[in-house]
């Protein structure tokens, strides 16, 4: 199951016709409670210029699953226009990883989600 937010207004904008988030979570929980291995894909996770949200709240809602897959939004000019895009996804991936370790959930961060940030070039003082 894919879950990128808990905000139904956002779902209606970006996933029109898809099942409401609450129903997705309930279906996932029912399967888990019956002994099925469950996982959720938190991707394409949006940047704050698309929607402000609390990733920890989403993760806590999903704390019963066996695996979480996390990935960035690709091929979206609004996301790449977000000036803190690299830092944002690096931090969100760290939050997901730490949460999964703490709760004991398998975790997979999709390739390309985290991006090394170039260090600021230090200028050498003129002699």
Image: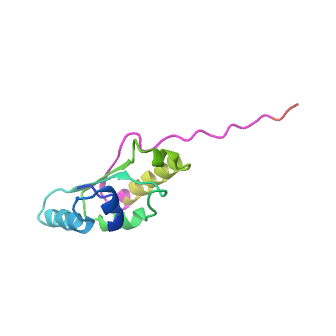
Q: Residue furthest top?
A: 127
State the extent of the magenta-drawn residues as a range: 100-124
Q: Position of residue 43 (x, y in %)?
A: 33, 51
Q: Is residue 16 left or right of residue 55?
A: left
Colouring style: rainbow
Determine if the magenta segment contains residue 40. Answer: no
Asked where in the image residue 10 lies, by quadrant, the reply is bottom left
- Residue in the picture at 39% in, 47% down: 73
Q: Position of residue 65 (x, y in %)?
A: 25, 60
Towards the viewer: 1 or 59: 1
Q: Position of residue 111 (x, y in %)?
A: 37, 40
Asked if residue 36 can be seen in this view, the reply is: yes
Asked if residue 7 can be seen in this view, the reply is: no
Note whether 127 is above or below 109 in the view shown: above
- Residue in the picture at 62% in, 40% down: 119
Asked where in the image residue 38 lies, by quadrant, the reply is bottom left
Magenta segment's dominant SS is loop
Q: Residue furthest left?
A: 34
Determine if the magenta segment contains residue 116. Answer: yes
Q: How many marks?
A: 0
Note whether 106 is above or below 80 in the view shown: below
Q: Position of residue 62 (x, y in %)?
A: 29, 64
- Residue in the picture at 13% in, 58% down: 36
Towards the viewer: 52 or 28: 52
Which quarter of the image is occupied by the C terminus?
A: top right
Which quarter of the image is occupied by the N terminus?
A: bottom left
């Amino acid at each position: 199951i894919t879950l990128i937010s808990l905000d139904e207004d956002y779902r209606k904008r970006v996933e029109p016709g898809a099942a409401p988030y609450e129903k997705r979570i309930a279906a996932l929980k029912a399967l888990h409670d019956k002994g099925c291995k469950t996982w959720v894909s938190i991707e394409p996770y949006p940047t704050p210029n698309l929607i402000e949200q609390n990733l920890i709240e989403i993760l806590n809602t999903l704390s019963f699953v066996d695996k979480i897959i996390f990935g960035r939004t690709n091929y979206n000019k609004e996301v790449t226009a977000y000036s803190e895009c690299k830092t944002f996804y690096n931090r969100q991936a760290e939050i997901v990883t730490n949460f999964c370790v703490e709760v004991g959930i398998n975790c997979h961060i999709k390739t390309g989600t985290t991006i090394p940030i170039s260090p600021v070039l230090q200028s050498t003082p003129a002699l």
